């Protein structure tokens, strides 16, 4: 068996080309080098074959270390000390676990896309509160236990920003639940029917950030909407957990839409006590995208028509 050992020689600086964890992916060259390096230690020290190391690391569920082990062995042979290599392996494992945890939280959140502000067209609607939006995405309001309301006309980017805030929060390590408003109320209704109300209420009440998107998009709200929303908002307010809501309806209309002015006042009172109210004005991004698709479709048809005419001329 080929065995792993460190020969105790004075370590050399780690080459820049292999310092970056992004360069630690296992490849065929690294595998060959690693296996060539693993030779019997004649000093009688305790050693272990590469296969044995991988097996034991798997037993310990140190999958991040397994993924970079062969590259780290090559790194050790280039002169890095045991401490340096071991520290890198620990960091590899931490990075791996953080990545896995992020993916788990993303899946649990209900978010189906991961937008960022780099994708946002600020020039199309220059009136948008850009600085306030950046502050929301920074997560400061979550750390402070504050809330946010994004109010404005349809298509002005409220949902896009809400999803961007959700994605940034997940990447920062927060637990997030994202629901479109109709799904939020449906979840509560179904849980009540199945006698699982306590579980879903706990989820909505205790997550670090709850996002309810497009509140009042549907004109007719469920009969219990006011009570359901009030329950969750009161729970979150008491626990100092952050809530972000988006709506295309003015807050003055919420009482009428919920058919309960008292509940509406209580909800808004909590949300705005330590809340950020952002108004979205301007043109519709959806109409812009639709116009762009129509234009591209027309151009494609014209190009195809021109190509067919050229082919017809060639046939003649």
Image (cartoon, rainbow, N blue to C red):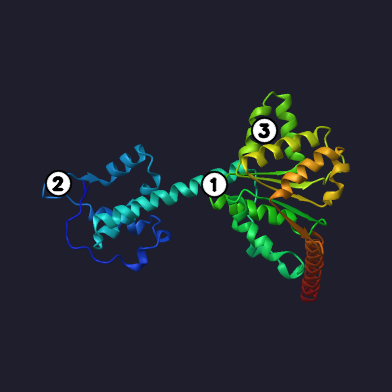
Query: Which of disc 2 and disc 1 is earlier in sequence?
Result: 2
The image position of residue 112, as x and y in percent, is 65, 48
**Residues tagged 1 and 2 counted as in contact (Cβ below 8 A):** no
According to the picture, the residue beneath numbered tag 1 turns out to be 103
Q: Which corner quadrant of the image does residue 181 belong to?
A: top right
The image position of residue 13, as x and y in percent, is 27, 67
Residue 31 visible? The answer is no
156 up-or-down from 194: above or below = below
Q: Is residue 94 left or right of residue 182?
A: left
The residue depicted at 63 percent of the width and 36 percent of the height is 203
Crowd rating for badge 2 (residues with CA inside 10 Å; few <14, some 14–19, many 20+): few
Q: Nearer the viewer, residue 24 or 255?
A: 255
Question: Which of the labelled discs sits on residue 53, or is there none?
Answer: none
Q: Is residue 136 left or right of residue 125?
A: left
282 up-or-down from 170: above or below = below
Image quarter (top left, top right, bottom left or bottom right) of the N terminus: top left
Q: Nearer the viewer, residue 69 or 277?
A: 277
Q: Nearer the viewer, residue 5 or 247?
A: 247
Q: Which corner quadrant of the image does residue 200 belong to?
A: top right
The image position of residue 134, as x and y in percent, is 64, 62
The image position of residue 142, as x and y in percent, is 61, 50
Whole-angstrom CA distance, mark 2 to mark 3, is 58 Å
According to the picture, the residue beneath numbered tag 3 turns out to be 201
Whole-angstrom CA distance, mark 1 to mark 2, is 41 Å
According to the picture, the residue beneath numbered tag 2 turns out to be 45
Q: Is residue 58 left or right of residue 272?
A: left
Q: Nearer the viewer, residue 260 or 47?
A: 260
């Amino acid at each position: 068996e080929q065995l792993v050992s460190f020969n105790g020689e004075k370590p050399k600086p780690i080459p820049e080309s292999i310092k970056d964890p992004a360069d630690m992916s296992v490849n065929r060259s690294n595998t060959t080098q690693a296996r060539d390096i693993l030779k019997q230690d004649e000093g009688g020290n305790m050693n272990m074959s590469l296969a044995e190391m991988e097996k034991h690391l798997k037993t310990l569920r140190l999958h991040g270390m397994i993924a970079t082990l062969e590259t780290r062995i090559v790194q050790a042979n280039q002169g890095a000390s045991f401490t340096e290599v071991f520290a890198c392996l620990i960091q590899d494992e931490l990075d791996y676990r953080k990545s896995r945890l992020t993916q788990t939280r993303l899946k649990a959140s209900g978010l189906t896309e991961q937008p960022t502000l780099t994708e946002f067209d600020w020039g199309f609607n220059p009136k948008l509160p850009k600085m306030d939006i950046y502050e929301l995405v920074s997560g400061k309001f979550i750390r402070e236990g504050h809330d946010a309301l994004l109010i404005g006309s349809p298509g002005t980017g409220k949902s896009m920003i809400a999803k961007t805030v959700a994605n940034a929060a997940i990447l920062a390590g927060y637990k997030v639940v994202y629901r479109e408003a109709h799904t939020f109320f449906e979840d509560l209704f179904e849980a009540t029917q199945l006698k699982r109300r306590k579980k879903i209420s706990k989820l909505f009440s205790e997550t670090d950030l709850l996002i309810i998107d497009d509140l009042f998009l549907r004109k007719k709200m469920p009969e219990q909407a006011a009570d359901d929303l009030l329950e969750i908002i009161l729970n979150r307010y008491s626990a100092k957990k952050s809530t972000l809501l988006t709506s295309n309806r003015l807050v003055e209309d919420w009482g009428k839409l919920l058919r309960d002015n008292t509940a509406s006042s209580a909800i808004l009172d909590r949300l705005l006590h330590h809340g950020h109210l952002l108004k979205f004005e301007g043109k519709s991004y959806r109409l812009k995208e639709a116009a762009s698709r129509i234009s591209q479709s027309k151009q494609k048809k014209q190009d195809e028509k021109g190509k067919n005419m050229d082919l017809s001329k060639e046939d003649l």
